[in-house]
Amino acid sequence: MKKILFIGAGSMAEALMQGWIKQNVFKAQEIYVTNRSDKERLQFLHDTYGINCNFEETIYQQADLIILAIKPKDAIKAMLELKSKITEQTAILSILAGIAISTITEQLGLRPVARVMPNTSATIGMSASGIAFNGQVSATQRTMFLQLLEAVGSVIEVEEDQLHAVTALSGSGPAYIYYLMEAFERVGIEVGLSKDIVRLLMTQTLAGTAEMLKQSVDEPDVLRKKVTSPGGTTEAGIKALEQYQFKEAIEACIKEAEARSRALAKSK
């Protein structure tokens, strides 16, 4: 694969570009990107990574892979403009939240389409992605798509309808963890630590906890109970979480995000 073209230049597109360049999957000069109007954003990506943002129209037909990375609300219009520019054989990789493969093929014609929901940790090669394929994706193309996502993290093949849940959990998940970190930092400063110390303590705690979950055969509730001594500090903290309905808040968070993904699909 010599040329890939991003339609859209947002955060997720940048994360994939940066991850692929870091992992030597693509050279910067093999990556092309365009968007509708934000020329400053394109210039930033060019200056930062060396990718192509000014190119001839022939690139649309020369591209080995088109990556749809526009905002869902702009997807239909963007695909209508794109259809006449690409060949009938060009494969599509979509990272559009809530936009079904059937919608993509309605707009761009029947062709190989993979729909994936990565997350911004692709930047550092640690994305968690779910991917679904249509029937036009060959075995060779399937392997190629999986290798692209494996290069920037882990990838799991799922049924397309399950991508709504993947979006809510791992696609949006980094934002929830960053939100939690905001709270840790705020309260850590309140109780007398510097922001740098809180950041060091909590990033290592989160990393260690994640690794424990990966390596241990125990379920999360068992691991939690091993940390929670009767009458101790952890138990006091858990009781506060229960008082403020922490689990219910997390459940509502995921369900709202999953429902929003489904609503985006229905609105197209």
Image: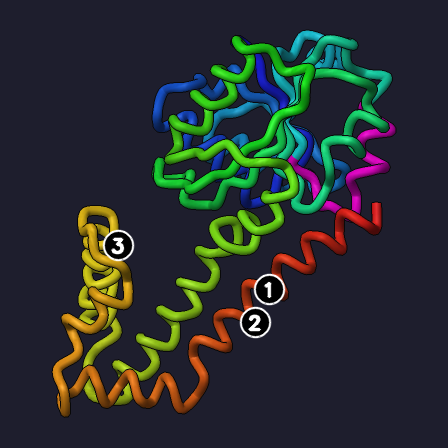
Q: Residues within 10 Å of mark 3 (few under 14, many from 20)?
A: few
Q: CA distance from mark 2 to mark 1?
A: 5 Å
Q: Residue at x 57, y 13 (%)?
A: 3
* Disc 2 and disc 1 in contact, CB within 8 angstroms: yes
Q: Would you identify the image quadrant in which residue 134 lies?
A: top right
| Element type at mark 3 | helix
Q: Nearer the viewer, residue 194 or 82?
A: 82
Residue 250's spot in the image, x, y percent? 48, 71
Mark-to-mark CA distance, 1 and 3: 23 Å
- Magenta stretch bounds: 69-82
The residue singled out by tag 2 in the image is 252
Residue 227 shown in magenta: no
Residue 224 vertical placement versus 15 (above, below) = below
- Dots 1 and 3: beta carbons under 8 Å? no
Report the residue marked by disc 1. 255
- Find residue 229 and report its horizontal and vertical position in percent: 12, 82
Q: Disc 3 marks which residue?
A: 210
